Image: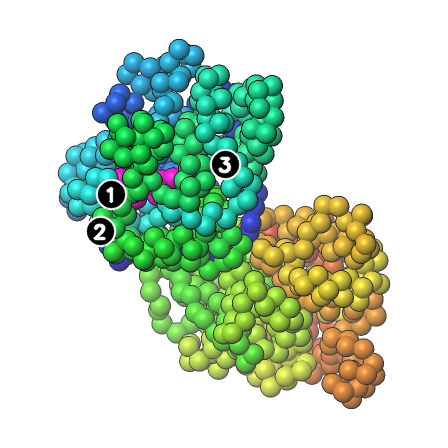
Amino acid sequence: MLAFVLIVTALVTAQAGPSPAIPEGRDLHSGNDDTAYDIAQRIARDGYYSESHNVITSDGYVLELVRIPYKRFQFWRNPFAPKKPVVFLMHGLQGCSITYITLGARRSLAYNLAEAGFDVWLGNARGALNSRKHLILDPDNPDHAIKFFDYTFEDIATKDLPAMIDAVLRITKQEKLHYVGHSQGATAFITLNSLKPEYNDKFISADLLAGVGYQDHFPTKIIDEIAKQTDLIFELARRQGLMEIGNLKKSAILADYMNKEEVEAANLFDKFLSFLEGISMLGRLEIIAGASIKQYAHFGQNIRDKSFRRYNYGPLRNLVRYGSFEPPKYDISRITVDLTMHYAMSDVLLSEEDVLSMARVIPNAKARRVARESFGHMDFVISNDSKELVKRIARDGYYSESHYVTTSDGYILEVNRIPNGRSQKGASSKKPVVLLMHGLQGSSISYIALGPEYSLGYLLADAGFDVWMGNVRGALNSRNHVSLDPDRDVLKFFDYTFHDIATKDLPAIIDYILGETKQEKLHYIGHSQGGTAFLVLNSVLPEYNDKIAAADLLAGVGYMRHFPNVMLKAFAISTNIIFNFALRIGNLEILGPNSVESSNCKNSDDAEAECAIQSISDFMSQLLASNEMIAGASLKQYAHYGQNIRDRSFRPWNYGAIQNLAKYGSINPPSYNIRRINIDTIMHYTVGDELLHEKDVLNMAKDMPNCVPRRVAKDSFSHTDFVGANDSKVLVSDFVVERLKKLYL
């Protein structure tokens, strides 16, 4: 059980931005009523075997259960293998089983659990596209629709879940299973075990992802406002026979009808549709699968009444149904399952207070706050980054380790290690050590993003090297500090430049690696800012020359006398204005979860600075074509480069004449003296680089005693192609690997 809890916890680790882009290869919802998802075909395309099982509920709904029993590219069961533990995943409101596979083979929770050795089952609630069936009722027949969609989340909890869970246990011949539920999938779990406590005995454990229950402190005002008109909106919809939500065209008919009958309710419903479109990406993402408006009405009643109780039919019908004028509350103290409630501070549908209140009442529940404040309600299932890098490396067939290093000023950095070649397990005998450092806006994923065949990190591991990949402060893997919170203490946390990375992060990482490996020296590879940091470190702290055997700098930025990009040169003139504007608005992070964005910067009082920041963000987003390689940075890093571009120099941060005099003993910052670097260094460069000019590379190579420039034999090769293009293997990586073999093996 502990292994399962740890796996689920790792897979929902908060590394996500607020609104992820649709991953490549995503099938989009067309909005056509006839759309049907062949989930088996989708799973097969992702390389997994699956089964489809139909389950009939006590009230006649036909539900599809989807099973993924094996790991990727396994298509039969070993008859001698022991039984696998069973895990059941339940989607949220407007979702279906595709929720848990929508991010593809490498990122989806269902696939990750299958790879971890679980027998994975995906449920589909009544009304979802995969379960839009009934023994008698036709949901598309107007005469049947009102009856078909006459259900709330309680019906899903007390009829759908028992039918599916009993079927799974019967088929697998198991007595218990693990449960994972997102949003309403968690609501259903809570409701089931409150009303039918005998089902507590059928669960080993449960992980609830943004599980909605108590609604005393509902966080979103617009929904709070709409909830006051819940009964009116529901009654108007029922009268019109429009009980299904999940298609904006149908819902618009209801809004038009209400405009004639009740203006206030119509306006509220319009707001409701807009909210749904925003939070769930309704009509655009394949995970949207339809639901009954009565489900929303049930949630709406609870929001309005600040409660968590059964559906309110009115005093008389309540008296007949429940024996009281008011609906009874769900008694969640009856839940005895070992339960973890994962929640996020930026959830627009669930407040921290309500989660903590539930955790106090449920005997074996613990609340787990996702360690990322910008993580949202849908990020639990659609965020590209809700998993650890180590899982990515494992799926590529490599053993890896994660190490944590604390700098002299309190930043906690993650360092990833790949000590062996593909399919080899555990740390092995002493090998030559290589440290790879990423560029600005990057992270360690830069060196594995191209997969086993093309990524430099993997190629070096396969060649027999002990590979370490660093993550600088502010990168998603190193967005931690012993006392500062990057989401609250923004100005303090992000008050650093590449000089701090060079003189604090690199020494901490290098010393840690040499201590762990019991080696005296390592080989250094740095891309872009990773090259800058190398130059600064060995200029300012020349004793580190003795700890680095040799180095390869891939588009390593240093001298900027001939900076090639005209747009960035223009922005560099206004570096101080842009940086001071960022300080004034209190946001120094760029292309991270708290990045500065502006869609209307031309109307701003600070138009020049705001548009410049947005343009820089856009430029870097385009430059880093792969979203997974964008990891966040401080705007002060950009400002430091901007100062050097503007001044055609390579020197520390310019604080202004008076502060410079106090800090450096001179009115201007002193230039970095790269002549102090005596390490055997090759500077790989390309004439197609947007951020580094050939003349600057050649001048640096002349000034460094043991440096050789190497021009990449493809003029169109760009700055990020060193880590982001498949032909980097032939043009760069193969050369580097062979060079290292000659040096060390």
What is the tally of numbered marks visible in this picture? 3
**Secondary structure of the magenta portion, mostly?**
helix
Identify the residue under disc 1.
Answer: 193
How is the rendered protein coloured?
Answer: rainbow
Q: Which residues are magenta?
A: 183-194
Question: Which of the 4 quarters of the picture holds residue 294?
Answer: top left
Mark nearest the camera among 2 and 3 is 3
In the figure, 130 relative to 483: above or below?
above
Residue drawn at x 26%, y 39% is: 192
Q: Amino acid at mark 2?
A: Thr
Q: Which mark is residue 731?
A: none
Residue drawn at x 42%, y 15% is: 140
Of the numbered discs 2 and 1, the one sitting upstream in the chain is 1
Contact between marks 2 and 3 (CB within 8 A): the answer is no
Q: Quadrant of the N terminus?
A: bottom left
- Say if the magenta span includes residue 712: no
| 574 sits left or right of 352 in the view | right
| Element on which disc 3 rests | loop
| Element on which disc 1 rests | helix
Q: Where is residue 609 shown, x and y percent of the image?
A: 79, 57
Q: Where is residue 17 shown, x and y percent of the image?
A: 55, 51
